[in-house]
Amino acid sequence: MSRAAHLTRLRQVIALIERAAAALITVVLAAMVVIVLSQFVDRYFTPVWGGVPADEYVKVGLVWLTFIGFGLAMRAGVEVRVELVDKYLPEHVRRIAYIFFDGLLLLMLGVILWKSIRLYQVGTLQTILGTDTTVAVPVLGMLFGFALMALALLARVLRRAVGVEI
């Protein structure tokens, strides 16, 4: 297989991951809306949840939305940045600075991912009060989000350093 064929295949895989993450966000958001609406019905009309604190499920969904959504935002290049001196720097210096800071962020995400694996393992042993869900469920959303962020950063570093558009 040629380099171009490998890049095309890699782009297809990344596009599939992005679509899956966007679909997951849609499902989680829809589930959160249903849970919140059912809480309204539970509170004012008829018991739906039977005393189970449904807001805990909404909190778990919010963790998933936040981290996976930020991973997709980084891939799209729309994350929040503080750019104080960027417009005053020459293009080549700006490119080097961006590669350096993206590399640092990628390194930091690697450390966080590595340490979060232990957090996930411990979380499987702890139940969220009032639910059947363990703490590992929101941690898993965080892990998926960090993995998406790492992929987005890796693609951005490759684009800036080598000129390969992924």
Image: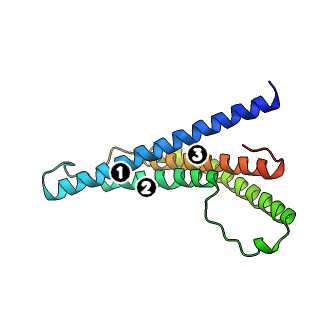
Residue 78 or 105: which is nearer the viewer? 78
Q: Amino acid at mark 3?
A: Ile
Give residue 117's mark.
Answer: 3
Query: Dot 1 corresponds to which residue?
Result: 32
- Given the image, on which type of amino acid does mark 1 rest? Met
Q: Residue at x 56, y 49 (%)?
A: 145
Quarter holding residue 53: bottom left
Query: Residue at 82% of width from left, 27% of height from top?
Result: 2
Which residue, given by chain and number where applicable, does mark 2 sit on? 62
Percent position of residue 78, x then y = 61, 59
Nearer the viewer's eye, disc 3 or disc 1? Answer: 1
Are the two marked residues, 1 and 2, in contact with CB atoms closer than 8 angstroms? Answer: yes
Residue 60 left/right relative to 72 = left
Q: Dot 1, how many residues are within 10 Å of its Cα: few (below 14), some (14-19), or many (20+)?
A: many
Q: Earlier in the sequence, mark 3 or mark 1?
A: 1
Q: Is residue 90 visible?
A: yes
Cα–Cα span, label 2 and label 3: 20 Å
Mark with earlier residue (1, 2): 1
Residue at (66%, 49%) from the top-left corner?
Answer: 152
Of residues 53 and 26, the one nearer the viewer is: 26
Query: Residue 36: where, in percent of width, then height?
Result: 29, 55
Q: Position of residue 9 (x, y in %)?
A: 70, 31
Q: Which mark is residue 71?
A: none
Q: Quadrant of the C terminus?
A: top right
- Secondary structure beneath disc 3? helix
> Does label 2 or label 3 sit earlier along the sequence?
2
Task: Name which residue type carries label 2.
Answer: Leu
- Snapshot quadrant of residue 40: bottom left
Q: Secondary structure at mark 2?
A: helix
